[in-house]
Amino acid sequence: MGAAVEQEDHVSAEGQGWLEERLGLRRVARRVLARPVPEGVTWFHCFGGLTFFTFIVLVVTGIVLAFYYVPSPDHARASVAYIDSSLPFGSLVRNLHRWSAYAMIVLVFLHMVRVFVHGAYRKPRELSWVVGVLMLLLVLALGFTGYLLPWDQKGYWATNVGINIAGSVPLVGPYLADLLRGGQQLGALTLLRFYALHVFVLPLLLGVGLVAHFAMIRKQGISKPL
Amino acid sequence: MAPPEEEPGSAPPWATEAPQVAITRRRFLRWGLGSVTGAMAAVLAAFGLPPIIAPAFRRLNSPWSPIGKVGAPEAGQPDLTVQGQVVSTIFKRTVTDAYMPPEPQETAVFVVNLGNDRFTVFDARCTHLGCPLSWDQMTHEFYCPCHGGVYDAQGDVTAGPPPRPLDRYEWKVQDGVLYAGRLYRVKGES
């Protein structure tokens, strides 16, 4: 009798799995994944999804890097060198992070070009476009803040130039520059706040934008191609 | 806009009987996309996990570090000449700590001169939970202040919770100087 009860635990009367009987995940998965797609959709429609793929790669490799990177002028370069030279697959993970970042920016633009050429931003999808443009700014900001983190000559001077450009904004420019720099001096505080932006603030905002972007696609469907 | 229903008669993937329906486009795509997605996740995990778990398999490197002269001591150095005497001292060990610049680390030990240029170098931490031990010259015992662990002069446990005798350092005498090397543990009575 015990065996019979045990068997019922694993397979329900309809032959469903143990988890399925309790959670009903197949129904959820079908609702989320099985959506009608208009005819004539091509590979050009993949750029958005590919951008999201690079986002996932960046999150995963970024988490691995966060286990070793130190956002301090004393140790930033040494910890990056340690990742590159002493960590198994460390150099691979760091380069995946770097190249995925490059690829993400390229793919974002290709995605925008596709949407623009197809006129897919028109009613009712204006908000998808607006959120998308905001996410473009977030992606560029992520690229800019990440560039400084290795604390090498290139990142240091590129950040110097970038902050000076922000400083040339009329009226608020000098305050904006000091805000980004964390004071008058490009140094320890700059590195730390770029790190905080790069690792906490910007990815979180980007995640919120992605949820909104995807929810709107779910609601409105993919626009009919030309 | 209701999602299209699955074809009737398609069996769930865990069904033991062979499905009666031929492979449909939907089924093919579902499994194809699922496999590719799974493969990409597996590749990411294969590169992402090793760096995180690597430190668990890394061993500390322990270069030979001088404790003191075996003969008559210089000023500020431990006196290791008295045979059978437990000498509490501190030596400097250069430990490599990832990307930190190498820095000498002060390490407390108890050194016992066994005679004939033979020594025992006890680690000064309790084998229970690592509290620093003190040597009582009156009772000839090592005491742990945390949980009442007691060891005799040979490093064997005489009371309290320690699971094994005191840990020791490998040692060598070179040019009249005692060096400590790798830390090791001994099991049971020694």
Image (cartoon, rainbow, N blue to C red):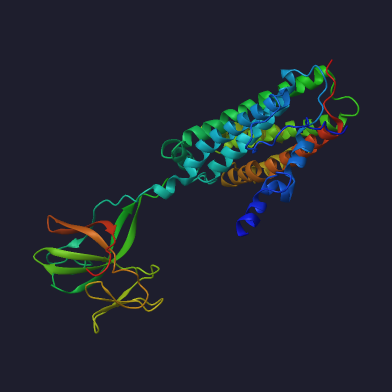
| Nearer the observer, A204 or A30 | A30
| Nearer the observer, A76 or B156 | B156
Work out whether B151 lies above or below A200.
Answer: below
Residue found farthest to the right: A123
Please give the name of the residue rendered at 77% of the width and 41% of the height, measured from the top-left corner.
A27
User: In the figure, residue B147 lies in which quadrant?
Assistant: bottom left
Does residue B3 show up? yes
Spot occupied by residue A38 in the image (x, y as percentages of width and height):
83, 22
Please give the name of the residue rendered at 43% of the width and 48% of the height, measured from the top-left corner.
B55
Q: Is residue B74 left or right of residue A94?
A: left
Does residue A151 show up? no
Residue found farthest to the left: B116
User: In the figure, residue B182 lies in which quadrant?
Assistant: bottom left
- Please state, as top left, top right, bottom left or bottom right, where the C terminus of chain A lies in the image: top right
Q: Is residue A79 left or right of residue B162?
A: right
Residue found farthest to the front: A1
Q: How many marks?
A: 0
Please give the name of the residue rendered at 26% of the width and 73% of the height, measured from the top-left corner.
B156
Q: Is residue B169 left or right of residue B115?
A: right
Spot occupied by residue B133 in the image (x, y as percentages of width and height):
33, 73
| Nearer the observer, B17 or A74 | B17
Residue found farthest to the bottom: B138
Spot occupied by residue B177 in the image (x, y as percentages of width and height):
16, 58
Please give the name of the residue rendered at 75% of the width and 32% of the height, measured from the top-left corner.
B9
Spot occupied by residue A4 in the image (x, y as percentages of width and height):
64, 55
- Please state, as top left, top right, bottom left or bottom right, where the N terminus of chain A lies in the image: bottom right
Work out whether A158 lies above or below A17.
Answer: above
Work out whether A29 lies above or below A22.
Answer: above
User: In the figure, residue B90 lies in which quadrant?
Assistant: bottom left
